[in-house]
Image (spheres, helix red, strand yellow):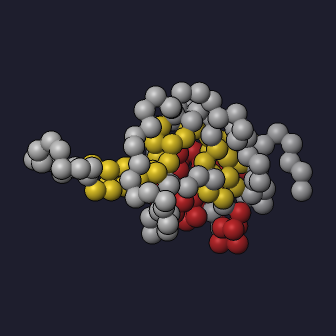
Amino acid sequence: MLLFPSKMKFKKYQKQRGRFKGIDVGYSFPKRGLFGLKILNPHRIKSSHIEAMRRYIQRRIKKKMQEKLQVCIFPDLPATRKSSGIRMGKGKGAIEYWCTPVFTGRIIFELGKSVNKNDAFWTLSKAGLKLPISSKVVIRKKFHN
């Protein structure tokens, strides 16, 4: 099941050009969990990528620890495209997919502290290969309950 918002103020938005520069310093380390998957390049991530990574992680960790997985991003930006062979004009194209813009250093997935360290590293690193950009696994330095 792909993620997308149930209600939007406007059906279609303009492209955000030139805004993918900078570092996301507000969410660069896991806040709720112990392990996190960090983005190293700014990009737009599709909802299909998020869902593929979530499914992969949930299949690899144990059943009792699946509630420890947290998805920290939500695709709320529609991306439109006109079909090929259409002439110029006649309005904006239909929505093709939903995405979310992420900046360098953003945490997109978190795992709780009850997950084994080796399993968490292996699972998150393999899940990061499903993205079109590079990522790395980070650990929270101080963990408070």
Q: Quadrant of the N terminus?
A: bottom left
Q: Is residue 81 left or right of residue 36?
A: left
- Residue appearing at x 46%, y 51% in the figure: 77
Q: Is residue 126 left or right of residue 111?
A: left
Q: Can residue 3 be seen?
A: no
Q: Quadrant of the C terminus?
A: bottom right
How many marks do you count on the picture? 0
Q: Position of residue 39 (x, y in %)?
A: 57, 38
Q: Position of residue 10 (x, y in %)?
A: 44, 57
Q: Nearer the viewer, residue 16 or 69?
A: 16
Q: Position of residue 78 (x, y in %)?
A: 41, 53
- Residue appearing at x 17%, y 44% in the figure: 89
- Residue appearing at x 48%, y 61% in the figure: 8
Q: Can residue 78 be seen?
A: yes
Q: Position of residue 61 (x, y in %)?
A: 63, 63
From this view, report whether residue 95 is shown above or below residue 26.
below
Name, please, the residue furthest toward the bottom.
Answer: 64
Q: Is residue 133 left or right of residue 116?
A: left
- Residue appearing at x 63%, y 53% in the figure: 72
Q: Nearer the viewer, residue 64 or 1?
A: 1
Name, please, the residue furthest toward the right.
Answer: 144
